[in-house]
Amino acid sequence: MKAATQIKFRQLGIIMLLWLFFGFVIAIYDHLQLLTYYSLGPSPAYSFGNSVIRNMVPGFIGALLGGSLLVFYVNEKFRDKPYGYTIAFVGISFVLIVAFITVVMAVFLVPLQTGRALSDPGTWQAFLDFITDPYPLKNAVVWAFIVEFTQLMLQINSKFGHRTFWNILRGRYNTPKEEKRIFMFLDLDNSTSTAERLGNEKYHRLLKDFFADITDPIIDNKGNIYQYVGDEVVVAWDYNQGVEAHQCLKCFFDIKTRIAKKSRYYQENYGWIPSFKAGFHSGNVVAGEVGIIKRDITYSGDVLNTTARILGKCSELKEEILVSSELLSLLNISKEYQSRMLGKVYLKGKSKDVLIHSLSLLQNAQGA
């Protein structure tokens, strides 16, 4: 299973657990409210156990249906839509789901309560009373807030990136930490001339499409999108994940494959198929949380400057991918890639020269 799909299932699992918990909390709230002096007390038909079932079962069904709708459909199909449009769709879908759950619960619970079939006139009247009771309406109001809150959290998670948002919630980088990271700086070719030809608005749409198309290959190779800078994207890997099956390098060639599959789309819409170059380097950086109004996790250190300078050498040396010897020495690439040492290259601002290599896929690996 691809990493992007795993992330979606993990999000769905979290939603299911949270909505089950919210269902239990609602049952407790209802129970305590019935015991206040404002209330006349519970009716003879009330039981706490039944209330728990009546809240947690819809929570589970709602998470399974509504959570799946949010994770697998809304946040995929509507990623380019205004947030208000997304809220409207979620709201309408939620009303339909609540109505469906209420009917399903009535079909199963009412015959159990009456001890007679649903076709019995008394049971049918109890069924109608169940689905028109203010109780489902009250729950609809509460769950509407829960659903919208869930959608908001998914949007925030998408904005920050799943790992960055989780690390901010945990406060992992409140105190700066030194960590080893692998970085890829990826940049579009001929961006200036392309922007002039297409115009600012159409070029922006091109960037939006390009960044959307390369997201899954990055996530599938366990990369984390650190930031976008104009027509450039910076991707970071945890050291072990980047080295494992040399996923950092595989990411670049998976992006090439993805764009090649979309070549007809780009040609028809922009008259140009994106080509790009990338520089790779690894080393120690300091990761820390910054900002008050807008919080984020940033990396600082010489590694990022060096990677940016390596990327800059791609155009000069007419290579699409350059890797530092420091990173290449950590990877076992002999069976899939062919490297060519370009020698020591002086990088402006560096006290020492950096040994860099160009990289290409071996023919047998390319065919596979």
Image (spheres, rainbow, N blue to C red):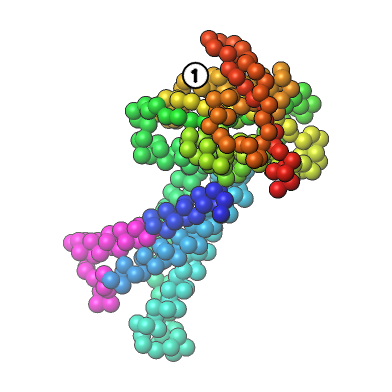
**Residue that appears at 35% across and 35% down:** 171
* Residue sitting nearer the eye, 368 or 122: 368
The three-letter code of the residue at mark 1 reads Asp
Residue 59 locus on image (x, y percent): 41, 62
Q: Residue furthest front?
A: 334
Vertical comparison of 221 with 317: above or below? below
Q: What residue sits right under mark 1 in the picture?
A: 302
Is residue 200 in view from this perspective?
no
Q: Residue furthest left?
A: 37
Vertical comparison of 148 with 256: above or below? below
Q: How many marks?
A: 1
Quadrant of residue 174 in the image?
top left
Determine whether, in the image, residue 340 is placed left or right of residue 26: right
**Residue that appears at 46% across and 22% down:** 300
Residue 25 locus on image (x, y percent): 30, 58
Residue 268 locus on image (x, y percent): 81, 41
Vertical comparison of 208 with 42: above or below? above
- Give the secondary structure at mark 1: helix
* Residue sitting nearer the eye, 282 or 63: 282
**Residue that appears at 53% across and 9% down:** 351
The region drawn magenta spans 19-48
Quadrant of residue 221 in the image?
top right
**Residue that appears at 48% across and 25% down:** 283
Q: Residues within 10 Å of mark 1 (few under 14, many from 20)?
A: some
Is residue 268 in view from this perspective?
yes
Residue 79 locus on image (x, y percent): 60, 45
